[in-house]
Image (cartoon, rainbow, N blue to C red):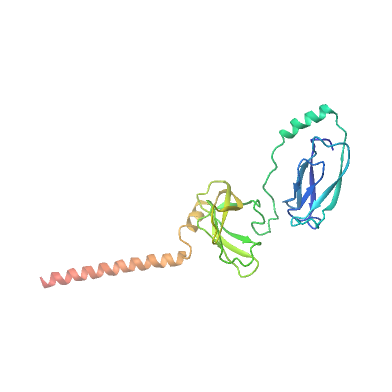
Amino acid sequence: MRPGDSLSVDAERGEAQYGDTMRSSVFLATGKLRMMDPLLTTTVTIACEARPGTYPVLRRGAGDVGPDEHPFRWARVRVEPADEAARRACHDKVKKLPRPGLEERWAPDATWPQSEWDVRTFLAGKRITITDNDDEGADGDIGLSSRAFTDRPVLRGAKAVLTATTTLRCDAAPGLYVVYRHDVGQSGHDKPWARLRIAGAARGKACSTEQAFPFGSSRLSVAAWTVGGTLLAAAAGALFLRARSRRGNSA
């Protein structure tokens, strides 16, 4: 590798954990492992000031914060010599590097969301399940909101996993939507908690039918109410006509 070169550091599940960091004295910045199923990966860049030689790459666990938790020697990287002209060109190259992507790709059978940037794609009008694996004991304490939702679901669960369901708006335009989290007793603005992508609307008839009735009702109950209302109106009309008939006879 030469100064200014970028390289991808990959790990399979079991070799490292999501959120582990990869660092080296010759990296421009520390890399953080993100999920791009089936691999955990991060991209790092060799610093322009890096001198020729072989350097260790250290992996540190996502939860390792104390001084007694020593990093693990993960790999080595060799830096090739570069003259001064190459180092000057390196600085220009680094300035033009694109910002790393934030969206992650998790296994399609994994519950959503696995992380703040676990972006899944859904059709507008569909009913989805939201799962929280990190807030054990917070039954009913976390509310969620998004411009893509038809309501404000609340995460519920008696065990370690909390879940909620919601329906996506039929009129949600294709694009990326943020899901915000609000905790009971929280002050200040709600924080981004997850993200999803709307790919396009479901078929118009199915979508409008699914959202024509409020939560807690059903087509059957609404239909029964309509039929009952029709019968009630008919009965009222019959009574009205009967009353008029009696008044006419008495006259």
> Which residue, as the protein is rendered here, is positioned at the far right?
53
Q: Position of residue 220 (x, y in %)?
A: 45, 66
Q: Quadrant of the N terminus?
A: top right
> Which residue, as the protein is rendered here, is positioned at the far front?
67
176 to 232, vertically: above or below: above
Q: Quadrant of the C terminus?
A: bottom left
Q: Position of residue 194 (x, y in %)?
A: 61, 53
Q: Position of residue 14 (x, y in %)?
A: 80, 58
Residue, x 82% and y 43% (percent of image)?
25
With 98 as the anchor, is 171 left or right in this view? Answer: left
Q: Nearer the viewer, residue 89 or 159?
A: 89
29 to 140, vertically: above or below: above
Residue, x 39% and y 67% (percent of image)?
225
Residue, x 70% and y 37% (percent of image)?
98
Place residue 182 in its image quadrant. Answer: bottom right
> Which residue, as the protein is rendered here, is positioned at the far left?
251
Q: How many marks?
A: 0
> Which residue, as the protein is rendered here, is positioned at the far top?
85
Place residue 115 in its image quadrant. Answer: bottom right
Residue, x 85% and y 31% (percent of image)?
82
With 25 as the anchor, is 230 left or right in this view? Answer: left
Q: Position of residue 71 (x, y in %)?
A: 82, 53
Q: Nearer the viewer, residue 89 or 166?
A: 89
